[in-house]
Image (cartoon, grey):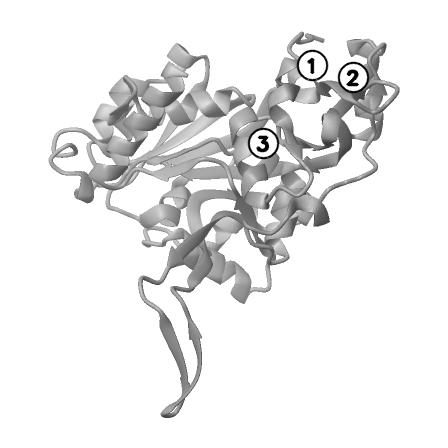
Amino acid sequence: MVLSSSVETWKEAMLPKGATIRDAIANLNATSLQIVLVTLPENKLYGTLTDGDIRRGLLRGLNLDDLIDMLVNINPLVVPHQLEADAALQLMKANRAQHLPIVDSEYHIIGLFSLKELVLPSERDNTVIIMAGGFGTRLRPHTENCPKPLLSVGGKPLLEHIIERSKQEGFRKFVLAIYYLGHMIEEYCGDGSQWDVQIEYLKEEKPLGTAGAINLYAPKSELPLIITNGDVLTDIQYGDMVDYHVRQGAMGTMAVRQYEWQHPFGVVRTNGVEIVGFEEKPISRSHINAGVYVLEPLALSYLNADERCDMPSLFARLQDDSKKTVVYPMHEPWLDVGRHNDLLQAEEKHAQENSS
């Protein structure tokens, strides 16, 4: 058992009672702790708010500007500062808790035990399939002689960022679906030994879409598969998404992001020729596909050999057969690098992170 001594990031995880869900998401993304310590004056603990609490709130229809108060757990498990890390670890395991706020006798927050900081991530046997066969048409001329997943962000290809991000969570088995300039991807990544991972390849003879290519894969276990587009940069926790998928008992899980769009004009609501109301630049909210999925291996049986199929079509087939499909509402930083501006934005974000 390897323990970590880092417990100081709790200071950044504090947020006052009465903050918004948007504030909480910004806090979670800044700390990567997946918990917010909700405070009263003088840093007294009011309650806790987890990553999962927010996802459930978004699923219930709450908006980003709603207050966090309705989501806060006001009776969290807490421990005194005298508790040793080993004892805290056992307590978290016994209570299936990811975090333990440390408080003094007057309930002031003085620290935080985090399971992910106390224990190095265990190895996960799930396979991560990365869809890396696209043409990258909208990124030309960058992709005329380079496949999109090998475009550089911060001195590393997009594909390498995804592999390293997954490896940090204990994933070691990867399958790359390749087509356009696939030989360049194979030459760069090899068998994965340079990153201490295993890499295999699915070689499309023609474009088969975001789902069709995985029909070429013969699962070697019954564990859920993680599928991600090769041009998606995100801080999503793949392991948490897999655990969520299993708890839901789903055949397929799709990561989605809430997208807000504000109408540039005031909207007039009418009934025939009669004006019945006005809305000044209303905001429309919807969920968009984030390009990350978890599938049971059995879901692959809904694909036909040599047939083009995109992931939404596969999910529709599962639904038509009464198989459970669910969304995983995500709030983590996310960028689909599909256009020139996206590539510039990814470079700027990486530069900001390295300078901070």
* Residue closest to the eye, 107 or 96: 107
Residue 238: x percent and y percent?
Answer: 54, 33
What is the three-letter code of the residue carrying label 3?
Gly
Quarter of the picture holding the N terminus? top right
Q: CA distance from mark 1 to mark 2?
A: 7 Å
What is the three-letter code of the residue carrying label 2?
Leu
Q: Residue 133 bears which disc, if any?
A: none
Q: Secondary structure at mark 1?
A: helix
What is the three-letter code of the residue carrying label 1?
Leu
Closer mark to the observer between disc 2 and disc 3:
2
Q: Secondary structure at mark 3?
A: helix
Residue under numbered circle 3: 239
Q: Secondary structure at mark 2?
A: helix
Residue 327 left/right relative to 211 = right
The quarter of the picture where residue 333 lies is top left
Q: Earlier in the sequence, mark 2 or mark 3?
A: 2
Residue under numbered circle 2: 89
Residue 181 left/right relative to 321 = left
Residue 24: x percent and y percent?
Answer: 59, 38
* Residue closest to the eye, 45 or 296: 45
Residue 293 left/right relative to 202 = right
Q: Earlier in the sequence, mark 1 or mark 3?
A: 1
**Image position of 84 with respect to 128: above or below:** above
Residue 301: x percent and y percent?
Answer: 49, 51
Residue under numbered circle 1: 118
- Residue name at image x 51 percent, y 31 percent: 127
Q: Look at the numbered discs 1 and 2 and tell me whether their residues touch, using CB distance below 8 Å.
A: yes
- Residue name at image x 38 percent, y 57 percent: 261
